[in-house]
């Protein structure tokens, strides 16, 4: 007989900033009912991109830190797969949770499915329909080997059904709404970032840039940075890889003369910078969504987006890397209507906890 008094075990696998944000509210929910084991792959390995998020998001110390670090997609994903598999064979969990669309996400899902352990994918069903994006491949493969698919939007549900996935789909809302609701008040009390940078509310533009498609191509990167320089009143927390490529392409000196380039900031500071900006320019999926929730117009430096609702609602425009279009959108684009409640009401973690509780009975 099965002893139903034994606590069910869940392994949550994280490794990069977007994973941390999604994991934080859900981890607190999981620990009410389950024994949660946290694996950190080490995909992001410097303090600004890693430990500061654990501290600010109040994520428990990982039970395992795999120290994978950087590398090509194949090398990094393969090394994670090998190391995660060892932990899963030791811990023998009832369910593995993976988050979003990073290499960590895919490695965790593959390792678990090959060991016949149930996989739950938080933020399932997103599609940009651009298979040149590594994240798109990660999403597709993770969804197709997951047992429980926790979808943030109705569009995500429809995407899965079109691909022939008909079981285990749950419309839960977005855990990032939970995270924003939990943390924006804390940020407003604690963050001094506006004073430190001598910024005023709604008096500056905020930019982020990290995708390899944009940073590793000289023409694309030059077009974007030329646009940044022309726009002017712009704050740019610069990702370490982006800084490296800007210097390699001899674009760093001009950029730092024209705009305010700063080191990456913590989660709470970033929320305040986002909420207080007059517009956001980004190639990040998560920041497009955060801009929408904060009611800040967004100019996306990509040709496609997985967050189609933000575009349909008129709060996000796809400018690609055309300098003139970027500048025009920053100067002229304004949302035409109020937003819809497309990402849920901030109770996604609770809903996911209920579904998992029923599944593991």
Image (cartoon, grey):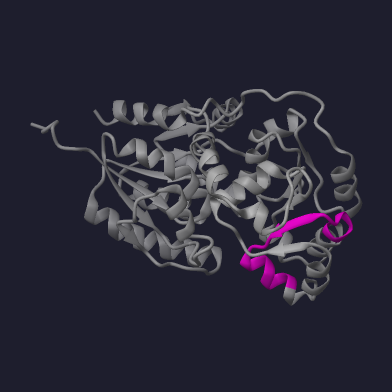
The N terminus sits in image quarter: top left
How many numbered discs sit on the rendered protein? 0
Is 222 located above or below residue 360 in the figure? below
User: Observer-nearest residue: 280 or 22?
Assistant: 280
User: Observer-nearest residue: 58 or 222?
Assistant: 58
Q: Quadrant of residue 274?
A: top right
Is 248 located above or below residue 4 in the figure? below
Is 156 located above or below residue 39 in the figure? above
Identify which residue is drawn at 57% across, 43% down: 188
- Picture coordinates of residue 344, whole percent (x, y): 55, 26
- Picture coordinates of residue 25, whole percent (x, y): 43, 39
Identify which residue is drawn at 80% across, 74% down: 253
- Picture coordinates of residue 168, whole percent (x, y): 42, 29
- Picture coordinates of residue 61, whole percent (x, y): 34, 55
The C terminus sits in image quarter: top left
Q: Quadrant of residue 251?
A: bottom right
* Left or right of 195 on screen, residue 315: right
Is 112 located above or below residue 73 in the figure? above
Whether residue 316 is visible, yes or no, is yes
* Left or right of 35 on screen, residue 173: right
- In the image, the segment drawn in magenta is 228-246
User: Observer-nearest residue: 78 or 287?
Assistant: 287
Identify which residue is drawn at 66% across, 48% down: 273
Whether residue 306 is visible, yes or no, is no
Is residue 350 rendered magenta in the image?
Answer: no
Identify which residue is drawn at 89% across, 39% down: 332
**The residue positioned farthest toward the left in the image shown:** 1
User: Observer-nearest residue: 330 or 10?
Assistant: 330
Is residue 235 rendered magenta in the image?
Answer: yes
């Amino acid at each position: 007989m099965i002893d139903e008094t034994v606590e069910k075990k869940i392994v949550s696998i994280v490794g990069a900033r977007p994973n941390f944000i999604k994991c934080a509210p859900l981890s607190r929910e999981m620990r009410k009912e389950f024994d949660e084991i946290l694996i950190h792959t080490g995909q992001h390995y410097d303090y600004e991109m890693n430990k500061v998020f654990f501290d600010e998001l109040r994520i428990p110390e990982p039970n395992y830190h795999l120290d994978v670090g950087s590398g090509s997609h194949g090398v990094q994903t393969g090394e994670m797969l090998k190391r995660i598999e060892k932990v899963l064979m030791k811990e023998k969990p009832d369910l593995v949770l993976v988050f979003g669309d990073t290499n960590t996400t895919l490695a965790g899902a593959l390792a678990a499915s090959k060991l016949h352990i149930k996989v739950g994918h938080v933020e399932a069903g997103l599609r940009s329909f651009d298979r040149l994006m590594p994240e798109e491949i990660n999403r597709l493969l993770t969804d197709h080997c997951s047992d429980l698919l926790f979808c943030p939007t109705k569009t995500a549900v429809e995407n899965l059904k079109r691909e022939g996935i008909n079981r285990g789909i749950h419309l839960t809302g977005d855990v990032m709404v939970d995270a924003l609701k939990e943390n924006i008040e804390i940020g407003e009390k604690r963050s001094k970032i506006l004073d430190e940078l001598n910024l005023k509310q709604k008096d500056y533009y905020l930019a982020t840039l990290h995708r390899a498609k944009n940073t590793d191509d000289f023409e694309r990167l030059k077009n974007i940075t030329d646009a940044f320089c022309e726009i002017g009143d712009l704050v740019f927390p610069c990702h370490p890889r982006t800084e490296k490529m800007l210097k390699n392409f001899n674009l760093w000196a001009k950029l730092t003369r024209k705009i305010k380039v700063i080191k990456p900031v913590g989660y709470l500071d970033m929320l305040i910078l986002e909420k207080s900006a007059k517009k956001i320019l980004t190639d990040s999926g998560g920041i497009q969504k955060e801009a929408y929730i904060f009611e800040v117009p967004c100019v996306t430096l990509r040709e496609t987006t997985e967050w189609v609702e933000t575009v349909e609602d008129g709060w996000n425009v796809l400018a690609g890397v055309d300098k003139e279009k970027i500048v025009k959108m920053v100067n002229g684009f304004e949302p035409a209507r109020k937003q819809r409640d497309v990402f849920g009401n901030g109770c996604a973690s609770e809903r996911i906890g209920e579904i998992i509780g029923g599944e593991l009975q």
